[in-house]
Amino acid sequence: MYGAGIDVGSTQTKCVVLDGNGEIVGRGLRMTGADVVKASEQVLEQACAEAGIETHEIVYTIGTGYGRFRVATGDDQVTEISCHAKGAVHLFPGTRTILDIGGQDTKAIKTNARGEVVDFCMNDKCAAGTGRFLAAAAEVMGLDVSEIGPVALKSTEELKITNVCTVFVESEILNQLSRGRKREDILAGVHRSIAGRSASLLRRVGVEEELTFTGGVARNPGMVAAVERRMKMKVNASEDSQFMGALGAALFALERAMAGVRRKEQEVQG
Ligand code: ADP
């Protein structure tokens, strides 16, 4: 039996396929783009190809993320907040607090040991402190988002980035570059600024260990280090951090598929 979770984010769409034992057997990832339906179909195909199965072998699919209602193959939808909590506690059972930094929003989530949401809060509408802010900094530097974290880790001199606005930070970076400041120091400042905003959000829900970092930005080692330094605690992050919402959705899918099987068995017996 296979279950799938499809997380249609504002920036990237992710899919996880689980086998009946809850093991990840396939993943799919692509930019969401303008065609949300196509993005969700393609990530499912990618994940099934990796799992070595056909899409019709998936018994149940849950859609999550901002585009969850556009997942044509979805049997049901669950919010990304519930899915991140479910996925994070599955991967790191000690998780009680989650920091999710995605392409355009940041969330702080409190969970219990069963992966149920206890409390959460989100950044305001603006992109400050999100992946978009880091992407803007990367663009000005002529780097890919996957390169800025490792560069920031080489910083030797502290430099404060004062702008939190994605538009104004670009000119601040250009200004610092023209003054001869090193790009690693500027980038470290950008990472510290996001860690600071994340810390304020986390304080609003109250931080309880363990803290798990999810979302695409958790793939940035410079960001993981900046959050650890700011929070003065070890942070759980993994290669699958960006798939956490899709993983949670796939776990919900598997639970519902199993419940369906049990119901049918009871009907047959009764
Ligand atoms: P959403 O669900 O909002 O679409 P994600 O959680 O998928 O967002 O995260 C997307 C963000 O993750 C992108 O804006 C990008 O900045 C960042 N990201 C993705 N891959 C990497 C990577 N390899 N290294 C650093 N950052 C990454």
Image (cartoon, rainbow, N blue to C red):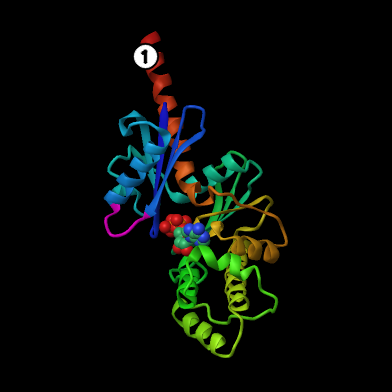
Please state the horizontal and vertical placement of residue 267, each as a whole percent of the image: 37, 14
Which image quadrant: the C terminus? top left
Q: Give the side of residue 53 with respect to residue 102, left or right.
A: left
Residue 154 in the image: above or below residue 180: above
Which amino acid type is shown beneath numbered disc 1?
Glu
Res 158 seen here: yes
Q: Is residue 162 magenta?
A: no
The image quarter containing residue 91 is top right
Q: Residue at x 56, y 53 (%)?
A: 119
Which image quadrant: the N terminus? top left
- Of 223 and 185, nearer the camera is 185
Q: Residue at x 40, y 21 (%)?
A: 261
Q: Give the side of residue 158 with respect to residue 106, left or right.
A: right
Residue 44 in the image: above or below residue 211: above
Q: Residue at x 41, y 38 (%)?
A: 50
Please state the horizontal and vertical placement of residue 26, each as a whole percent of the image: 44, 38
Q: Which residue is mark 1?
A: 267
Q: Residue at x 38, y 53 (%)?
A: 30
- Of 183 and 103, nearer the camera is 183
Q: Which residues are magenta?
A: 31-36
* Disc 1: residue Cβ within 8 A of ligand 1's nearest atom: no
Q: What type of secondary structure mainly makes up the magenta span?
A: loop
Residue 168 in the image: above or below residue 136: below
Please state the horizontal and vertical placement of residue 201, each as a whole percent of the image: 58, 64
- Of 227 and 209, nearer the camera is 227
Q: Give the side of residue 97 with respect to residue 232, left or right.
A: left
